[in-house]
Amino acid sequence: MTPTTLRRHTLDLARDLDSGSWVPTDLERSIANRLLTASNPVGCITENAVRDATWEGSEPLSRVNDGRLSVLLAEITYSLAETERDAAGLASALSLLSAVNRRA
């Protein structure tokens, strides 16, 4: 994965979310909510928060909606592990998680 992979995947998912091509499941919304809650005190997503949220629905998450959110979480984790973090990509991903969380 490259740093731009996170941004590209986030933009693709945001577009599909807006168009209705991707309709997040209850599990995906729950995981987005957990990540947003975990990131609120520190102002950003952390590797531990991603791991903890992914653990909640590890196997089903990889199957629902072709595992799209699962792939995004993997890309977030990869970006967080990099020495030079993709701040714009992480901010976009956090914004997307917020949009997913708002979907009912």
Image (spheres, helix red, strand yellow):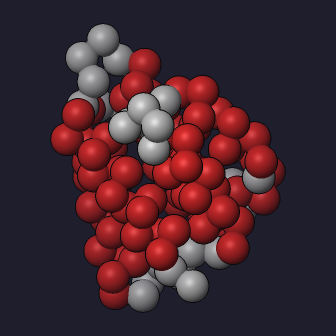
Query: Going 51% across and 68% down the picture, which residue do you hit?
Result: 101
Occupied quadrant, residue 26: bottom right
Query: Going 64% across and 33% down the picture, which residue do you hit?
Result: 51
Q: Quadrant of the C terminus?
A: bottom right
Residue 55 is left or right of residue 75, and the answer is right
Q: Position of residue 36 (x, y in %)?
A: 50, 51
Q: Is residue 54 above or below residue 87?
A: below
Occupied quadrant, residue 19: bottom left
Depth check: give the residue in front, 34 or 81: 34
Residue 11 is left or right of residue 30, and the answer is left
Q: Is residue 68 above or below residue 87?
A: below
In this view, the residue farthest toward the front is 41
Residue 40 is left or right of residue 8, and the answer is right
Does the image show residue 53? yes
Q: Position of residue 38 (x, y in %)?
A: 55, 41
Q: Position of residue 95 (x, y in %)?
A: 33, 58
Query: Going 45% across and 44% down the picture, which residue do you hit?
Result: 40
Q: Position of residue 71 (x, y in %)?
A: 52, 48
